[in-house]
Amino acid sequence: MFESNTLRRFDKLETPFYYYDLRLLDQALSACREAADAFDFHVHYALKANFNDRVLQAINAKGFGADCVSGNEVKKAVETGFPAEKVVFAGVGKSDKEINEALDLDIFCFNVESIQEIEVINLLAAAKNKKARVALRINPNVDAHTHHYITTGLEENKFGINQWELPACVDALKASDNIELTGIHFHVGSQITNLDVFKSLCVKVNEIHEWFSERGFVLKVLNVGGGLGVDYHNPDSSAVVDFKKYFEIFDRFLERKPGQEVHFELGRALVAASGSLISRVLYVKNGLKKNFIILDAGMTELMRPALYQAYHKIDNLSSNTDGLVKYDVVGPICESTDCFGKEVELPATSRGDLMAIRTAGAYGEVMASGYNLRERVRSVYSD
Ligand SMILES: *Cc1c(COP(=O)(O)O)cnc(C)c1O
């Protein structure tokens, strides 16, 4: 888990902080790179999972592209060194300012999420005498079988263009001289661990791809999004995701035309395992019905449990007594949802113990907030 010299280092540091194991990050990036190369697949890293500078530098160094969901993420990607021709920009609510800035940077592609957005990008591109490359984000109505808060590919979700809107979409594209259609894009949800979901997605993509072919569109890119899940329960034994198994599904079930590129947008699967939130126990409250461990980290540092009832494994790094005790592990924030885990079995825990909340490298530090006027959470790196 953590080596003894790392633990000695933690002991001297002010808590809470995010700890990034850059060697583990590199292992995950290499595994993904290798597996993707074997199938000639292109991977764009979804910046929103973690835009910590050191993390981004490591990802850029491996040659991945960038998948952005705001104008500032587009700028950040380009500033970090991601080539503009490998930057894509998604999101249901791109502002005119964000679109203009992305046009100025000549990014690879806008993933457009409505017919009205096609019209707006066309107007803004025309004003600059440019041609904007776009992919249509299509809602495939595929159930991701994940928590309903992180499902995005169903008709009731706000994301993407519904299939019944496609004829109108084609009309809008034909009327837009400053738009070039590069491909179709899908993203059905996050933390998907049932790989059959991706099989269903492939079937849907093939069907929609065919629909476009029949109408004479040649699509350069099929973008199947991200969403590959990680094993939050076993952070040590399955630290690196099986990327090969994931890509194999697309290789087998997705019908590619010769020369057509397949793009992926992975976030969580690349970065989750390499981060842990390290915190110290402030107080232990032993009650009649429950025991509480109160940490110096809370939902202001890691929001996932409060936001989507997410599970993170919690380890006590200071104590290893045999007998296990059940604790509710909570933070100091004045909200009842500020709880990292209920009835967690841990060794007997005392004030001052160091605790690790594992697999916190994705959607952790980036969601930190200043609620309760909390200090900005720090980061520490393995090197
Ligand atoms: C969030 C997001 C991703 C990445 O999702 P992960 O579950 O982290 O892999 C990819 N594409 C789009 C459009 C997204 O919004």
Image (spheres, rainbow, N blue to C red):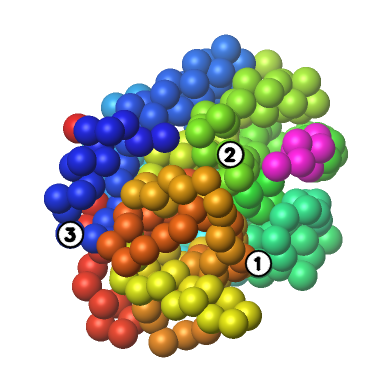
Q: Residue 80 lies in what quarter of the image?
A: top left
Give the quarter of the figure containing the C terminus. Answer: top left
Magenta highlight on residue 197: yes
Residue wearing tag 1: 149
Residue wearing tag 3: 14
Q: Is residue 183 visible?
A: no
Residue wearing tag 2: 234
Q: Position of residue 98 (x, y in %)?
A: 36, 64
Q: Residue 381 lies in what quarter of the image?
A: top left
Q: Position of residue 150 (x, y in %)?
A: 64, 61
- Residue at the spot x=52%, y=55% of the render? 346
**In this rendering, would 224 be left or right of 23?**
right
* Tag 1 secondary structure: helix
* Tag 3 secondary structure: loop
Magenta highlight on residue 84: no
Mark positioned earlier in the residue sequence (1 or 2): 1
The residue segment tinted magenta is 193-199
* Tag 2 secondary structure: loop
Question: Nearest the camera: 201 or 377?
Answer: 377
